[in-house]
Amino acid sequence: MEQIIITHPDGSQLPLFSKKNISAVTNAEQNVALLADDIVNISVQSATALQFVLGDTIEVYGKTYTLNQLPTVKKTGERRFNYELIFEGVQYELLDAQFLLPDNTVGDSFTGNLFAFVQILISNANRVFPGKWAVGEYPDETEYKTLTFTGENCLSVLQRLCEEYQQEFEIVQTNGTRVLHIKKAGVNFPYTFKYGRSGGLYELTRQNINSKNVVTRLFVYGGSNNVPNNYLTNRSSNKLCLPGKNKNTSYIQDAEAVAAFGIKENTHNFDEIFPNRYGEVTAAGSKYNAFVDGTMNFDLNEKDAEGNTKWLIAGVNAKVHFNTGNLAGYEFDVHDYNHATKTIEVVPFTDENGMKFPSETSVAFQFAPSDKYFFIDINLPDAYITEAESKLAAAGEEYYTQNRQPQVQYGLTIDENFIKQFAGNLTVVNLFVVGDYIPVQDADIGVDKSVRITGFTRDLLKPYKYAITLGDAVSKSTYTRLIADKIGINRIIEMNNLADPSKSRRNWRASQEVLSMVFDPDGDYYSEKIKPLSIETTMLQTGAKSMQFVLQNVIFEPNYQGNPNYIRVSGGNLIHYTIEETIRNWTVAATEFSELVSDTAYYIYARCQKSGNAGNIILDTIQRKVDYEAGYYTFMVGVLNSVQTDAGGSNPGRLVSLTYGSSTINGRFIKTGRIESGDGTTYFDLDNSEI
């Protein structure tokens, strides 16, 4: 680029190469990574002070980049100013838009396919940036999933959706509109690079090789849902197998890979692939708990020559699971099926709050035309088995192709003359795009395959100069700016405990009952078992009655904005299931605490009204019991530790240690909410089903 021009929000422009300002660009690079960064870094040196404002933009080869944070300024003389600017691609607009579910959604969960989620995302983007965002390409017939969203921005949701559906995204700017495409990015580059040099046109450096995970014989299995009864007899497997193969032969193998690396076995389970039929409600049934599916193409009650049901499984209740509509996410036992009218009647159920599903009176909880569902716990006709096996084979081949050779990563630096032979001498183009495939031959380790461009750095002052990273694996990363805002010791704790309070209440009562019934089965076996260094007992329980609650959507942010004496707590809910006879729910207000004392640790309490539904988080250095204050419950949440530093006093920060909830150990059974490592980086969150 001969000139780099900044456009201010008011439309005025500032050329960075300027005789008037005696300014010049000393460095300018475009950094792009697949599913990650898209930024432009510019270093400017000037003899006069330059004015940059948030919202400044630049155009780089057809893409708009925006200044979303003020530049770093360094003055080294009376007439010498150095500026470091970071311009961000349009994808970072999504950081500023929260992902809000539609108004008619109950709770924080939504059931839909990929397109439904993307539509909600685009709606939220246009809520903040009216008319700027649109949906482009997207895959058809994606799986319906129930996902939960709490306090997430649209960019993190977009990356999460790509991970959930094994997709990638690309944003194309057209006349000011950001068109979001959900697809596997990239095309094949028409030139094969080889390890080493050839005519001085390029340099290919192998940066990392991982041959430990090479797989030459891949056992492939699908899910177990709707796998027919005779599968176990004929295939020796209760999971879906590859077409025509049984449990021990359901593998993919390539002779060349075996010859190169030997037999290296591994197994991959595609649990999401199983025989399935997506049905659709075409009309309401004559009863509130029935619906008609005019597309039903087999008789659920059909019997074979011996009088046995072909599709219904003896002793097992057939079920329908709804993916869309007012009852999305709900699952019902099938009570009856009439093939003449193609009517399915389900068994209603009543939840612990007395709500009946489907509802006899409320349209908000009834079946409706176009609702989608699928069967569970039935056998399906052979056509559905064959279709699922073919889908499994395709998924297995794709996975095997990626893993039958060593995982490689290359750094590719290309001579400018080499680029020009493709781009032409007079036109500067975007020759490389992240996601493109470049054929690579590396005889040293037997690699001969197309490797993806996972990122590149382009010198904007020398537009034909690229430094390219090639790799087999795509690393999804969050935005660098968010990470930079937190010092290393920061640990943001988000309480998004979706555990059913009613079930938690029952479990607590059950544990209390068990505790009251514990006795010494040997008479006096445990009487001498409590010693200074050991305890032997029948049952162990931790956690007081007042601590049996869950926090929903509450985020603790210690060391906020890098200040160890500043903590921010978001709003949310506290749901208590033991303090009173009925479950109590308080709305916890957001709050901030600044000017904390560095060498002081604080108790974290939730102060909740006894007669109302409002609560707030408080910090104190004294011990407060649950009845500390008249008219309020004071619940112990945890401890905000004092400021700790690394060796030499660097990197000061606080940790939050939460203490609410309970754990019980009796015999070989442990009931608890979360198990984590000492540094908190590895954990099993049993309440949220998260590892």
Image: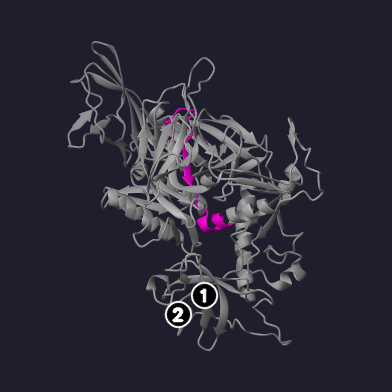
- Where residue 682 appears, as percent x and y from the top left, is 59, 38
Disc 1 marks a residue whose amino acid type is: Pro
Q: Which residue is mark 1?
A: 348
Does 119 sit above or below residue 496?
Answer: below
- Image location (x, y in percent) of residue 587: 38, 49
Q: Secondary structure at mark 2?
A: loop
Task: Please tell me in which quadrant of the rendered image residue 79 appears.
Answer: top left
| Residue 340 in picture, x, y percent from top left | 53, 89
Relative to 164, residue 340 above or below: below
Which disc, if any, is residue 288? 2
Q: Which residues are magenta?
A: 482-506
Q: Nearer the viewer, residue 360 or 101?
A: 360
Dot 1 or dot 2: first in sequence order is 2
Q: Is 404 placed left or right of 62 in the picture?
A: right
Which numbered disc covers residue 611?
Answer: none
Q: How far apart are labels 1 and 2 at the CA level?
A: 9 Å
Mark 2 crowd level (few <14, some 14–19, many ≥20, 10 Å Cα):
some
Q: Is residue 434 left or right of residue 314?
A: left
Pick the quarter of the image with the N terminus.
top left
The picture quadrant where one finds residue 298 is bottom right
Look at the image and say whether residue 489 sits in the magenta stretch.
yes
Residue farthest toward the bottom in the current orientation of the protein? 340
Asked if labels 2 and 1 touch by Cβ distance under 8 angstroms, the answer is: yes
Element under disc 1: loop
| Observer-nearest of 555 and 578 | 578
- Give the amino acid at mark 2: Tyr
